[in-house]
Image (cartoon, rainbow, N blue to C red):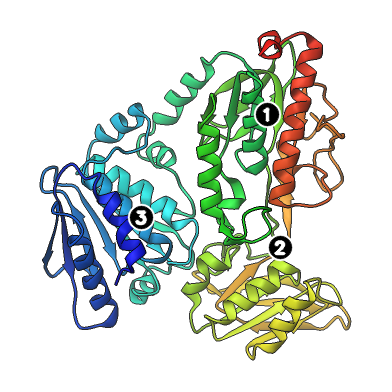
Amino acid sequence: MLDANVENQLTTYLQNLKRPVELVVSADERPKAKELLSLATDIAALSQLVSLTESVGERTPSMTVTSPDTGSQIHFAGLPMGHEFTSLVLALLHTGGHQIKLAPEVIEQIRDLPGEYRFETYVSLSCQTCPEVVQALNMMSAINPNIQNTMIDGALFQDEVNERNIMAVPSVYLNGEPFSVGGISVIEILNKLDVNAASRQAEKLSQKEAFDVLVVGGGPAGASAAIYAARKGLRTGILADKFGGQVAETVGIENFISVKETEGPKLVANLEAHVHDYDVDIMDNQRALSLKSGELFEIQTESGALLRSKTVLLATGARWREMNVPGEKEYRGKGVAYCPHCDGPLFKGKRVAVIGGGNSGIEAAIDLANIVEHVTVLEFDSKLRADEVLQRKAASMGNIEIITQAMTTEVVGDGNRVQGLNYTDRATGEQHHVALAGIFVQIGLVPNAEWLKGTVELTARGEIIVDAKGQTSLPGVFAAGDVTNSAYKQIIIAMGSGATASLGAFDYLIRLGEPADAVAA
């Protein structure tokens, strides 16, 4: 099951085990079940601390990673390969006593949670966001035996997916009831389980000393800015809703100079590790609510925290643009989706639409065409805007239909899930209906700058206007990345603009006579 290279790597990882780990496999004669049993057998052969038993489980095929010493249980329903193989490796290590990379106070909070929690996390193996959620819940399971998590491959357990009307991943259930859809971190999970956790955390954040540079946003621009500021000896903080931003949802990255090919989650992990090499205070799972200027700048967060800084660097990025038509919000997660790589496998053999004929839209259509029965691409303009090579590829596939001059007017459903959409032919004015199971929206990005209206100058599209040094219209406030009026929205450009804005902030502080220690360094 495992090739020689993976076996060698896994053997090295398993040397970190400090206590026994038992693999309990429920398998039958189906191909995936045989593969799972083969995988478990290969793993057990790599370490004397790993044992294997077979037993009939709640789901088949499935595997439980359990600790005889602590009683912790982490379940995998399906074959945890693809992006979820890392989740399996970490489950083995954490169950076997290897250090869990969470703050001591977070580990203590998890250990002290009262009650029992049975999580079920539905994933697709091509989903970039799913492993983050699975790993967060698995870590909690390894810490507290009263918490259990089961990763469920939605493509393999279609009956459950249909019964629970799951049309987006990751979808998490707690004790049989819906808990969350989409990315969610350990801190966010704790905030939902422990109602006082957010306020306690906000109080701690408010007690922090003022920063020299406070970066708002943890994507490529924010990470780059923080590194450059810290290298100058400035007291630096990052306030981020989610470290990595949209890059975490990007599948293939082939235009990051010097790196021929990588994936979003890998790049995010490298970014975070690089930031951790410096003295940067990372405050994750925090969303900025307002910015006020005075003797010090003040950032108010949605959780109630108040942070102060001599300069602020805004790198809040952008999010997927919505259609803003009736039914879109009602059926989000019920057939309306924004990540074809994540949710595409849930629509296997069904008819779907892609809204948007740019590169993102046509790439999504090509990917989906390999999974679904039929893809209808609706483009508002009279022609596609995607690169010619992508258009040729789409045209060569027999199950992609492209409709131009199509203005989507409504998402139609039965109250539980999408059944189709209505659109207007802009050339003739005729109304049309398309019967569909899913709609993937790929019509560009919206800058995350609404909270700054009236504070800094914005373009008509809501982007922060910056000068050559990344300075906004408010002295001492800088901005970088996709949230600004940069000509192009690319990862490498965002990183460069983050460095530029950070150096601009350093220059601003020098002229104020503030960072004397840093200048001396």
The earlier-in-sequence mark between 3 and 2 is 3
Quadrant (top left, top right, bottom left, bottom right) of the N terminus: bottom left
Res 356 quadrant in image: bottom right
Q: How many labels were placed on the picture?
A: 3
Position of residue 479 relative to residue 295, above or below, is below
Q: From mark 3 to mark 2, how far is it between C-alphas?
A: 34 Å
From this viewpoint, is residue 432 visible? no
Q: Which mark is residue 323?
A: 2
Q: Which mark is residue 290?
A: 1
Helix, strand or loop under label 2: loop
Q: From mark 1 to mark 3, how far is it between C-alphas?
A: 37 Å
Furthest toward the bottom, the residue is 398
Position of residue 376 relative to residue 498, above or below, is below
Q: Is residue 385 left or right of residue 185?
A: right
Circle 2: is it few (<14), some (14-19), or many (20+) Cα within 10 Å? some
Res 62 quadrant in image: bottom left
Q: From mark 1 to mark 2, how far is it between C-alphas?
A: 27 Å
Mark 3 or mark 2: which is in front?
3
- Nearest the viewer among 265 and 142 is 265
Circle 3: is it few (<14), some (14-19), or many (20+) Cα within 10 Å? many
Helix, strand or loop under label 3: helix
Q: Is residue 169 left or right of residue 234?
A: left
Helix, strand or loop under label 1: strand
Residue 147, horizontal then vertical, whole percent: 24, 46
Q: Is residue 435 left or right of residue 414?
A: right
Residues tagged 1 and 2 counted as in contact (Cβ below 8 A): no
From this viewpoint, is residue 429 visible? yes
Query: What amino acid does circle 3 point to?
Result: Ser
Query: What amino acid does circle 1 point to?
Result: Ser
* Label 3 sits on residue: 87
Q: Residue at 31% across / 33% down in the picture?
A: 107
